[in-house]
Every structure is written in C-alpha cells, then in structure tokens.
Image: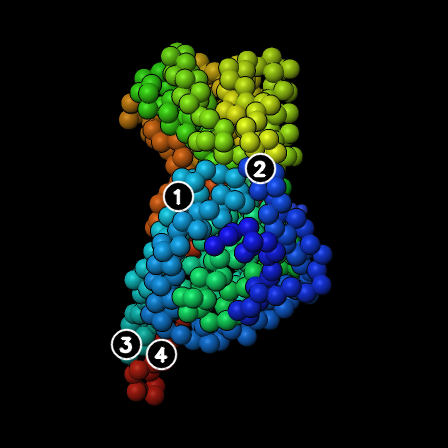
Amino acid sequence: MNLVTELSEVKNYINGKFERNGQSLMDVFNPSDGNKISSIPMSTKQDVDKAVQAAKKAFPNWSGMTFKERVQIFFRYRSLLEKNMDELTKIVQLENGKTYGEAQAEVLKSMELCEFAVSIPQIIVNEVQEVSKGVECRIERKPLGVVASITPFNFPNMVPHWTLPNVLVLGNTMVMKPSELVPLSTVRMAELLKEAGLPDGVFNIVNGGKEVVEAICDHPDIEAVSFVGSTKVAKIVYKRATSNLKRCVALGGAKNHLIVLPDANPEMTASNVIASMSGCAGQRCMAASVMVGVDKVQHIIDKMVEEAKKMITGDNLGSVITKEAKERIENYIAEAEKNGAKILLDGRNTTVVGKEGGYYVGPTIIDYVTTDMSVATEEIFGPVISIIRAKDLDEAIAIENASNYGNAAAVFTQSGGLAKQVMDRASAGMIGVNIGVPVPREPFSFGGWNESKFGVGDITGRSSIEFWTQCKKTTIKWNPEAQTNWMS
Ligand code: NAD
C-alpha cells in the first residue's frame, strides 16, 4: 500500500462511510521532511451534528447488544491491529515524525488498551442484595449515550485508544475529533473497526479544529466529553462542556520533575533520564522536563551528557511536530542562555542530511537553571531537560510542589525511605521510583493532578468505567405479602 496516495485526502467518517462535503481543506505535513502528505476537511457545526445524529441512531441497537457480542468485535479488532501493525506504525511515523520503534510502541499499547476493554465484562458484575425480607436492590451500569473524544497530536494511535475501546464496549456510541496535525491514523482505525464487524454509526470521525471542538462542547445530544491536549485548551473545553451540563474529563499539559539523589545508580539514572526527556522528541506528557539534582550529582550529570550524545536526530531521535514547535523550543533554549543558564548540550540549528525540510531539535541539556526561568516552569515539549540544583530532598520536593502542573514525578535513589518521601509528598498523579516515564499499565488508570487534569477520575483503566457509565438502581419486592412495605 502506498500510504501517501491512499491517505492523500482525509474525509470525515459518518455512519460507516467516508464523506466530504463542501468544507475548506487544510494541508497536513510530514514533520520529518516538511513535505505535504494529505489534507483534511475543516468541518463545521453541521458536520458535528450529522455525526451525532448517526451515533444517536446507532445507540439503541448497540447498547441493546450483550456485553459478549460487543466484546467479540474488540477481540477481532485487537487481532487486526496486530495483523496490520507495520502499516499502522508507518502511518504514525509519517504524520507525527517519531521513530519506527516509538510508533510501534503506540500500536502495542493500543492492543493492550483493547485487552483491558475486552476484560470489562469480568470487572463489571452488577450488584444485588436482599435489603429487607423479600426485597432486593440491584445496581446495573448503563451506557451514557453519545459521547465524544478530542485528541492531541503526540500519540495519533494510542491516545484515541485511551477512550475508544472502553467507550464502545460499555455500550456508548461516539464521535472522535483527532488532532488536525495527525488525522491519518484514525482513518485506518475506522476501516479496521468496520472489518471487525462494528455496526455503522457506532464510531464516527469529524476532522477539523476549534469549530468542531466548540460544536462538540455545545451539542445537546452529547452526554460526555473527554479531552487530551494542552492545559490552555483543556480549561476551555472543561468549562464549556460542563457549563453545557455534560460530564467532562480534560487532560492537560505537564512539567515533570525527576529528582536525582546522590546515591542513585549513575548508569541507570542517566539512561532513564535521557530516554525520558528525548523519547518521542520530548513530546510526551510524561517526558522528563526538569531534573532536580540533589547535593553532589555531578558524576550523574556527566553521564547524562554522554548518554544524550548517543541520540542522533533523524535516526534514534525523531522530529518535532511543526516548524513553529521547533522555533518555540529553540527560543526557550536561547532565553535560558541569555538569563545565565549553562547549555551543556545544544540541539539548536539541527538538520538531517536529505531531510533539510524536517523539523529537528537535537538533545539539549541546560544546567544551573533557576526556578524563575521559563525553562523551569513552562512546558517546552521538546528534547530538552533543565537541571535545577537543590541542597537537600526537602528543597527538591518544594521545587516539584511549586509547579502548576502535576502529571508525573520521579525519584532516582537506592534508599527506600527517601523514595517513599517522594511518593508521599510529590504533587503529581503518576510517580516513578527509578523509572523515568511512569505510565501506569492497564488496569491501573492514567491521569495527572493540578493543571494536568480537570474533572473527576482518570481516562483509562477501572476509573474510566465510572466515567463512561451511569448506575441504574432497581428495587424489587419479591415478597407476596400485601401489607409488608419495602422498609420492613
Ligand atoms: P492542543 O491543546 O493544541 O490540541 C488538542 C486538541 O484541541 C486538538 O484536537 C485541537 O484541534 C484542539 N484545539 C486546539 N486549539 C483549540 C482551541 N482554541 N479551542 C478548541 N479546541 C482547540 O494540544 P496538542 O498540541 O495537540 O498536544 C500537545 C499537548 O497535549 C501538550 O500540552 C501535552 O502535554 C498534552 N498532552 C497531555 C496528555 C495527558 O495525558 N495529560 C497526553 C498527551 C498530550
């Protein structure tokens, strides 16, 4: 299959068909060489409504099927992800610019997310109790109806799977709005879902930008909205969706602190910190952004520089998403330098031979960063790590706690007692001990704290079951005695 030809124009997917109306088009580029690869429709409020009506029509039949029937489709879909892994990986690479290995890891994670979804019937066993003589109460989990999912550019295959399998297995129908920068992966997902036997209208895609997101937040027939993206937009979406009386969980940006203590294993720590800051070109919401070095850690910093020099742009370090992103990241580095920080490794002005139009930033390590610098407080979202020196663990934890964000935090040490202090006192939703990217695996749920997440509960795992369902409570009087009331 020639991916560029096959996906040269992305269409909306509504009621089981790809369709393009009169919408204006926006170009989509391959970030690793800057070439145009596709275009997407900039859809309108009317397109959102059309998708919602299709999802609404599909809901009674889909929610009326047994769990077992819905789950069979996701067993087949998971096998199709595996069968088509190479192609799905190449699509992620093409639109996002990450390395083959990183792109493949996304597809593997999507399969794991499907494995959780097919286990949901084993988790949700409804509750029944005899609450008084001959009277029984039961609680059943029921789907909400039509729900929506809005996704970012950095994981074109995995983040849509944070919601899609659980949402559908639980009996909801959905409208997805992928990032306009990476719309290709969802096209293949729709095709594979159809091949797996998903009825038309259960899953719909509306492409576009702000107008689509606003229409989703405003649509009276959408019951719940999930969002993953920057904190700025997460706040807009959370406020707008909840003011329209919808459920909403909105995951935002991050500024993750890795606290390194002098007793940490130097090799393991250096390789973990560098892998965390440079993996997916630093465009992970779980990426290391600040290393807080406690006391004497110069030997570990020296090793980090050695490790980072092994990251070769265009080889084991992919591109960033756009020209604007490259400029933004380089401006952060320049500002830190101007304000007195020391650039130990400088990734500015990086190009890759043969891919001169690509958007590359090399691995960058900035030392002697102070807490007032923008590289200490703002999300950079590139392969850059800022080192802040702290005299002791209390000061290091205070630096972590001062961040507005709270997605992840980690500690590197060989002391259980000191690790436990960070586990207890860090103000973040996901904590790593000697691990740089502490993503919880299924069935543990994914979600941050503070300005890294708005709303109750997490987006994956058991927690998401609560979010995508509502409880129906039924009281039944089996007792035939007319005079006995249900309170007896
Ligand atoms: P983004 O916020 O720019 O875009 C996310 C979605 O919102 C896209 O679908 C986009 O079309 C839409 N959007 C953009 N501007 C909008 C506006 N003004 N009004 C309404 N909708 C709008 O995010 P991005 O650049 O695609 O992704 C990177 C960000 O996502 C980073 O901040 C990263 O930390 C975050 N992220 C967070 C998590 C998490 O789990 N917390 C996971 C992945 C990415």
Q: Is residue 309 above or below residue 190?
A: above
- Cβ atoms at labels 2 and 3 below 8 Å apart: no
Q: Earlier in the sequence, mark 4 or mark 3?
A: 3
User: What residue is shown at x 34% (from left), y 88% (from top)?
Assistant: 482
Mark 1 or mark 4: which is in front? 1
- Give the image quadrant in which the ligand numbered 1 is located: top right
Q: Earlier in the sequence, mark 4 or mark 2?
A: 2
User: What residue is shown at x 35% (from left), y 45% (from top)?
Assistant: 441
- Cβ atoms at labels 3 and 1 below 8 Å apart: no
The kind of residue tagged 3 is Lys
Mark 3 or mark 1: which is in front? 1
Q: Secondary structure at mark 1?
A: helix
Q: Measure the C-alpha gap from mark 2 to mark 3.
A: 73 Å
The kind of residue tagged 1 is Ala
Please tell me how crowded label 2 is: few (under 14), some (14-19), or many (20+) other residues with Cα within 10 Å: some
Residue behind mark 2: 33
Residue behind mark 3: 133
Please tell me how crowded label 3 is: few (under 14), some (14-19), or many (20+) other residues with Cα within 10 Å: some
Q: Secondary structure at mark 2?
A: loop
The kind of residue tagged 4 is Ile
User: What residue is shown at x 47% (from left), y 16% (from top)?
Assistant: 389
Q: Secondary structure at mark 4?
A: strand
